[in-house]
Image: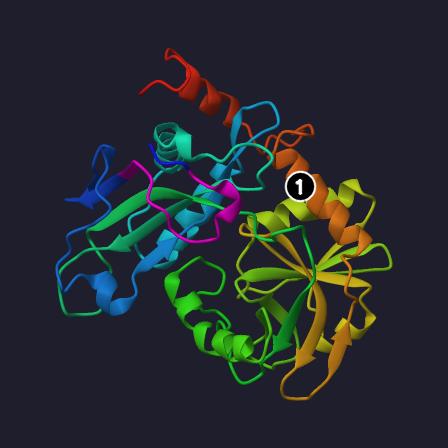
Amino acid sequence: METIDWSALGFDYRKTDWNVRYSYTDGKWSPMEVTQDEYIKMHMSASCLHYGIELFEGLKAFRGVDGKVRLFRVADNARRLQSSAERLCLPVPSIEMIVDACIEVVKRNERFVPPYGTGASLYLRPVMFGTTVGLGVKPAKEALLIVYCSPVGAYFKGGIKPIRVAIDREQDRAAPRGTGDVKVGGNYAASLLSGEKGHELGYSNIMYLDAAEHKYIEECGAANFFGIKEGKYITPKSPSVLPSITNMSLRQLARDMGLTVEERHIPVEELATFEECGACGTAAVISPIGFVYDMQTKAEYSYGEEVGKTCLELYTRLQDIQYGRAEDKYGWYNCAVSLFTLINKGRPKGGPY
C-alpha cells in the first residue's frame, strides 16, 4: 500500500480505490454500481459532449479530532444537485440516492481520508451528464450519475492568508435568468478566459459584476463573496449567484457571533467601505481578500496583509465544526454518526470491506 504525504497534497485528482454509479435508462434509475474503473465508455454523439448537459457538486469528508469521519452537509449538496438537474431537464435522482452514494464512496475509500491535524480532507465529486445519442438539441433521456473522491490538501499551506483579486468588467460569468444559480460546467468554462487574464497579472481570482448593468458584485472566481462592516455580514443577493453551502453555514455562524446578516445588492463602490471581505466555498472555506484592483477603472481597494479578526473567527468556527472540535448544534453532520458506524461496524481496524 502506497504511503501518502498528506502535507504535499494540492487540490487535484488522485486515484482512489472505488467510485459508485447510477445509470438512467428506460425511464428508471439502475441500482447503485460500485466499481474500480476510472473510465467511462460513451458514444461520440452523447448529448453532454455537444450541448453541455452536465452538472456537478463538491463536498468534503473530514477525519475529526476524535477519529470519526464526518461528511459535511451532504443532504444540502444533494438538494442543490437536484436543482441543477431540473434546470438542465435531466432525470432527477432522489436525495437518498445521492446521500447513499456519497456515504458508500467514503466508506470504501476510508484509507484515503487524511489523518486529523494534516489540514487535508477527502473531496467528493458527484457528477452527472446526459448520455442520449443524437444530433438535435433536446433533453437527455438517458443519464449517468457518478460519485468519486480524491484526497486534497489544505488550501492555504502554512495558514490562512489574504489573496489579491481583480475586477474584470469585460467578461461576465453568468447572465440574468441564465444558469448562474445552478452548478453546471458551462458556468466554469465561461470564467476561464478572465481567470487566466487575472492570473497573468498576479491575481488569485476575478471578481465578477452583474451582467445586466455591471454595477453590483456577484461572485469571486468560483466562490461567493461577503463583506464585513459595522457589525454586519453582507453578501450578494442575485438570481445568477450559486447558493453556496459554505456561505449558508457562514451566515448562520455570523448570526451566532452577533453579526447582522444582509443578503442584498452590493454596489461595487461599497468595496471602499468594508472593513474586511472574503470569498467562500468548499475548497478554501474562506479566502480573505487583502486587495482588489479594478482592471478597467484602475480603482484600488486595500484591506491589509493580515487576516481580519472576523474572517479568522468565522473560518475557525466552521473548521472546528468540520473537524469535530465544536458542537454540531445545527445538525450539519446528521449523517456523520451513521457514516462512521458504517465504516467501522463489524470489521477489525484496517480490515477490508
Q: Is residue 5 magenta?
A: yes
Figure quadrant of the N terminus = top left
Q: Could you say which is closer to the camera, residue 202 or residue 137? A: 202
- Residue 130: where, in percent of width, then height? 24, 56
Asked if residue 206 lies left or right of residue 352, the reply is right
Mark yes or no: residue 86 visible.
no
Stretch in magenta = 4-20
- State left or right for residue 347 relative to residue 20: right
Compared to residue 284, the image places residue 2 above or below, namely above
Q: In this figure, which residue is indicated by the disc labeled 1? A: 318
Q: Left or right? Give the position of 8 relative to 325.
A: left
Determine the residue positioned at 35% across, 30% down: 104
- Position of residue 128 relative to residue 76, above or below, is below
Q: Residues within 10 Å of mark 1 (few under 14, many from 20)?
A: many
Image height of 110 relative to 341, above or below = below
Residue 223, horizontal then vertical, whole percent: 57, 60
